[in-house]
Image (tube, rainbow, N blue to C red):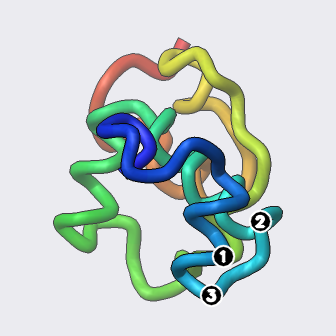
Amino acid sequence: MLKSGEFATIAELAEQEGIATSYMTRILRLTLLAPDLVEAILDDKLGREVTLAQVLEPFPLEWSLQQQAPAVLESHKGRSGPTT
């Protein structure tokens, strides 16, 4: 909706969806996750111990570094892709 121009700002989108702008910002950050991590999440390969709160924790933007990040990403480390 942001990309198409339907909403000019994150604040407008958050208001439309009835959520806080800060939460919308954290949700949008998930678009920066490495493709293999997104696939693991969608395929439910990270286990039940992984929560949305863990996934929303700050993580490195560089995909190769995400493999080494703590919390939810740590549980995925070594399952696919490089870990160095």
Q: Quadrant of the C terminus?
A: top right
Residue 3 picture quarter:
top left
Query: Type of residue at label 3?
Result: Gly
The residue labelled by disc 2 is 21
Query: Type of residue at label 2?
Result: Thr
Q: Is residue 25 left or right of residue 51?
A: right
Q: Position of residue 64 (x, y in %)?
A: 51, 16
Q: Position of residue 63 (x, y in %)?
A: 49, 20
The residue labelled by disc 1 is 15
Q: Residue at x 39, y 67 (%)?
A: 46
Contact, mark 1 vs mark 2 (Cβ under 8 Å): yes
Neighbour tally class for label 1: few under 14, some 14-19, many 20 plus, Cα within 10 Å:
few
Contact, mark 1 vs mark 3 (Cβ under 8 Å): yes
Circle 2: element type: helix
Circle 3: element type: loop
Contact, mark 3 vs mark 2 (Cβ under 8 Å): no
